[in-house]
Amino acid sequence: MWLNLISMQSSEGGGESGINKEEYVYKIAQGIEEKIPVEFDVLYLRKEAGNDISPSTVVLFQELERFNLLISKITLTIANLKRALNGEIGMNSELDNLSLSLFNGFLPDSWARLAPQTQKALGAWIVHFGKRFKLYQDWIIREPIVMWISGLHIP
């Protein structure tokens, strides 16, 4: 019920001292954009691995490819949202959904389709996203002895 109430709340600007929706969404988008890493260079990593790769390394490459798709989608949609909020491009339904999701603290649908299934709110999801990035970075350096299964895209 609370989620429905939040999604139905007015998105009009605040009072005299309040911040309007567009400014708030822009700040949230800016904050997320600063936390998004660059994509992994999977082709380079495949060359470095050579022909002698373990099953774990195959899983790593699959995970990195999926993670790169997610990074690419987040980067593109946030850049487009910021451009739309600045009036440089028109707001479409995907950007409107992204804006509403960021405003309400939900994981946007366009990102959720490329991410592991979750019920996390946006803030907790961003923290989880950072932990997954760290997992992959460490895995590239050295194959883990213990695997964080729920940190994988497709466990």
Image (spheres, rainbow, N blue to C red):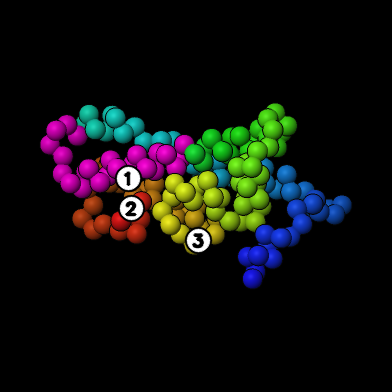
Instruction: Give x and y (percent) for residue 69.
Output: 42, 39
Image-based side of 121 in relation to 55, left or right: right
Which numbered circle lies on residue 3? none
Instruction: Residue at the far left: name it.
Output: 52
Mark 1 to mark 3: distance in Å?
Answer: 20 Å
Can residue 130 be seen by looking at this rendering?
no
Please name which of the two marks, 3 or 2, marks the residue nearer to the observer: 2
Instruction: Residue at the far front: name it.
Output: 93
Task: Identify the mark nearer the N-term, 3 or 2.
Answer: 3
Taking depth in this image into account, of 153 and 16 the one nearest to the observer is 153
Q: Is residue 68 above or below residue 145?
A: above
The secondary structure type at the circle numbered 1 is helix
Question: Quarter-wise, where is residue 150 in the image?
Answer: bottom left
Q: Which residue is mark 1?
A: 63
Mark 2 Cα-neighbour bin, 10 Å: few <14, some 14–19, many ≥20: few
Instruction: Residue at the far bottom: name it.
Output: 1
Amino acid at pointer 1: Glu
Q: Is residue 10 above or below residue 141?
A: below
- Based on the picture, tell me whether residue 55 belongs to the magenta stretch: yes
Instruction: Give x and y (percent) for residue 95.
Output: 63, 41
Q: Is residue 148 above or below residue 134?
A: below
The stretch in magenta equals 49-72
Q: In percent of the image, x 50 and y 61: which residue is there?
A: 120
The secondary structure type at the circle numbered 2 is loop
Main SS, magenta residues: helix
Instruction: Give x and y (percent) for residue 44.
Output: 28, 29
Q: Which residue is mark 3?
A: 120
Question: Quarter-wise, where is residue 94 in the image?
Answer: top right
Q: Is residue 138 above or below residue 125?
A: above
Please name which of the two marks, 2 or 1, marks the residue nearer to the observer: 2
Q: Which residue is mark 2?
A: 154
